[in-house]
Amino acid sequence: GYLDPMRFERRKAVVTGASRGIGTAIARLLAAEGASVACVAATDANGIETKEPYGATAHSCDVSDAAQFAALSAEPRTP
């Protein structure tokens, strides 16, 4: 497939389920196309392989828990 490294430049993406499978693939693709990616997993965020090679950030959060999601949303962002 065709990748445009500038397609998502200056865009931010939050990918849930990013610790494995399709979530990892989506996070990597968005990062490869220029997005600033926050990888979210309900389990240990240190297990998210996506973050290192693509400069993504990793966050542990159960998005079905309103309090956890609110805390994630309130975290400071980097440009």
Image (cartoon, helix red, strand yellow):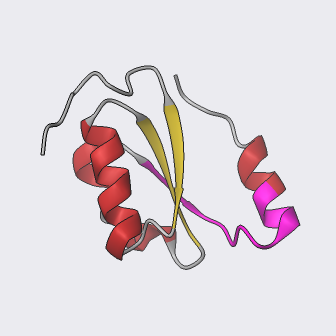
Q: Residue 25, image x and y in percent?
A: 30, 61
In the picture as drawn, the residue positioned furthest to the front comes out as: 1
Near-viewer residue (22 or 68): 22
Q: In this view, does 23 lie above or below 6?
A: below
Q: Position of residue 30 (x, y in %)?
A: 35, 43
Q: Is residue 62 left or right of residue 52?
A: right
Displayed quadrant of residue 42: bottom right
User: Which quadrant of the structure image shows residue 75?
Assistant: top right
In the image, residue 63 lies at what x, y percent?
A: 71, 67
Q: Which residue is drawn at 68% across and 35% down?
A: 76
Residue 66 located left or right of residue 18: right
Magenta span contains residue 60: yes
Residue plotted at (38% across, 28% down): 8
The structure residue drawn at horizontal position 36% and vertical position 56%, both measured from the top left corner, is 26
The vertical placement of 60 against 13, above or below, is: below
72 part of magenta stretch:
no
Q: What span is colored magenta in the figure?
A: 57-69
Indicate whether 69 appears above or below 30. below
